[in-house]
Image: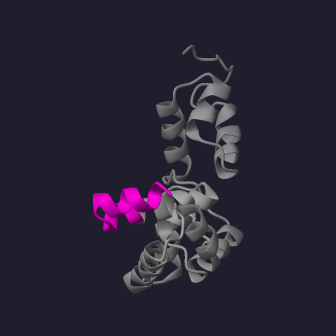
Amino acid sequence: MGSKQYPREKGSRAPWHADAISMFKSGRSQTDIANKHGVSRERVRQVLVSYGGHVSRPTSDEVQDNIIKLYDSGLCLDEISSKLSLRFKYVSRVFTLRGVRVHPVRRKAIYGKILSLASKGSRVSDIAKDLGLTYRSVFIILQRYLDKKEFTKIVGR
């Protein structure tokens, strides 16, 4: 990957640094920024660290509120991260920042509902729709908690 040459005085910052920071804060990935400016992703990371020391994308209050609302509606962290296209790590960090404790009991209750509906003959897609979950989440939970024969019976419907 070739580097673009930016004319600047010795000791001054390259003009693309400010653009890279604003792009990153608006949600663009380090790879996107690197491709736009013709530098390596590592160089973008270095620039971001030199300007602020923290290279994770900030989430707006609106996004954080949405994460909490989704959790309160019964979704677990991996479902929230999937639904909002955010990394699990970011979703988890919101709970830490907001002081919200994630309750494993809620997850068990949802698992119980899923297993109960599955044992009554409901299809995976119907369970997901009824509980407001993704098909993949229900599929993984059933795969994890049912033996192979039961799982094949339910998913094969």
Residue at figure coordinates x 60%, y 54% from the top left: 85
Q: Which residues are magenta?
A: 142-157
Viewer can see residue 152: yes
| Left or right side of 95 for 64 | right
Magenta span: predominant SS is: helix
Report how many numbered discs are placed on residues in the image: 0
In magenta stretch: residue 151: yes
Please identify the residue farthest to the left as the structure is shown: 147
Q: Position of residue 106 (x, y in %)?
A: 45, 84
Say which of 13 and 9 sits in front: 13
Is residue 31 positioned above or below 98 on the image?
above
Q: Where the N terminus falls, by quadrant?
A: top right
Nearest the viewer among 116 and 61 is 116
Q: Where residue 19 sits in the image (x, y, percent)?
A: 71, 39
Direction from residue 108 to residue 18 in the image, left or right: right
- The answer to whether residue 102 shows anywhere in this view is no
Q: Residue at x 64, y 79 (%)?
A: 69
Q: Residue at the top extreme? A: 2
- Tell me how the rendering is colored: one colour
User: Residue at left 34%, top 64%?
Assistant: 150
Image spot of residue 91 (x, y percent): 52, 65
> Please, is residue 135 above or below residue 23 in the view?
below
